[in-house]
Image: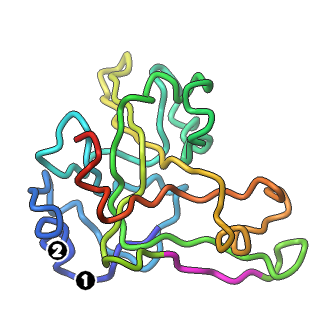
Amino acid sequence: MLLRPESKLAIEITDFFNKNIDHKENVFTSNFINGFSYPNLPILLDNKPEVITTNFTLGLLPTNRDKDFRKSTLNARVETLEEKPSFAPSVNKRCLVIVSAYYDYHWSDPAGKSKTKYQINSQQAEICCLAGIYNNWQDKNGKIWNTYSIVTTQANPQMKFIHNHKETEGDQRMPILIKQEDINACRF
């Protein structure tokens, strides 16, 4: 995932959505963000659409699961959301994950030793949204866990070319990129 490297990014997001950000100081800029670092990206929650929040981390944690479980829930398949015990309780907790682009790799050889990194972004705007689901709960020690997953779908022809990993052959995925005209139509 990528957030554009500009010092005024929080202001641009605020202007783009005409909404305030809860903690502007938490909006960071980077040319590349590794999902396994469980970043706090700006998101819009369906139950609090008046503000963009930055206090949710990537990798949805179902209630009462160990934080290491997040590595398994960075992404959630839209086709099986209601079937998977990790995601079913959050199927109606929807969010928009705000990014300027995301990255995926094309394997140039069968072993994946040679890869080409592709930046995927919206053709409509410099800021875009990915579909997401979220969960929040308090553990027995009183820690509040605010987490989210990015919802994926079957890859379109362009992404099938890019996301050609051997282990995903025939099952290439891509995040659901919300079209600009559909952002305001989301149930928020």
Point out residue 101 in the picture as x, y percentages from the top left corner.
43, 73
Reply yes or no: does residue 116 show up in magenta: yes
Badge 1 amino acid: Glu
**Quadrant of the frame with the C terminus:** top left
* SS type, badge 2: helix
Query: What residue did someone put label 2 on?
Result: 12
Question: Which one is in front, 32 or 121?
Answer: 121
Eyeballing the image, is 66 above or below 174? above
Residue nearer the viewer, 27 or 80: 80
Say left or right for 8 vs 31: left
Q: Main secondary structure of the magenta part?
A: strand
Among the 4 quarters of the image, the one containing residue 136: top left
Tell me the SS state at disc 1. Answer: loop
Mark 2 or 1: the one toward you: 2
The amino acid at mark 2 is Glu
Please say if the residues under marks 2 and 1 sit with CB atoms less than 8 Å apart: yes
Residue projecting furthest to the top: 140
Q: Report the number of discs.
A: 2
Q: Name the side, left or right, on which 17 lies relative to 173.
A: left
Distance from disc 2 to disc 1, alpha carbons, whole Å, reads 9 Å
Residue at (53%, 57%) from the top-left corner?
Answer: 175
Q: Quadrant of residue 130?
A: bottom left
Question: Residue visible at 43% across and 28% down?
Answer: 90
Give x and y (percent) for residue 72.
Answer: 62, 41
Inspect the magenta stretch and tell me whether residue 117 lies in it.
yes
Q: Is residue 53 left or right of residue 102?
A: left
Determine which residue is flagged by label 1: 6
Tell me if mark 1 has few (under 14), some (14-19) or many (20+) residues whose alpha carbon lies within 10 angstroms of its own.
few
- Residue shown at 31%/78% (left/top)? 126
State the image coordinates of residue 85 (x, y, percent, origin top left).
58, 22
Residue stretch rendered in magenta on the structure: 115-120
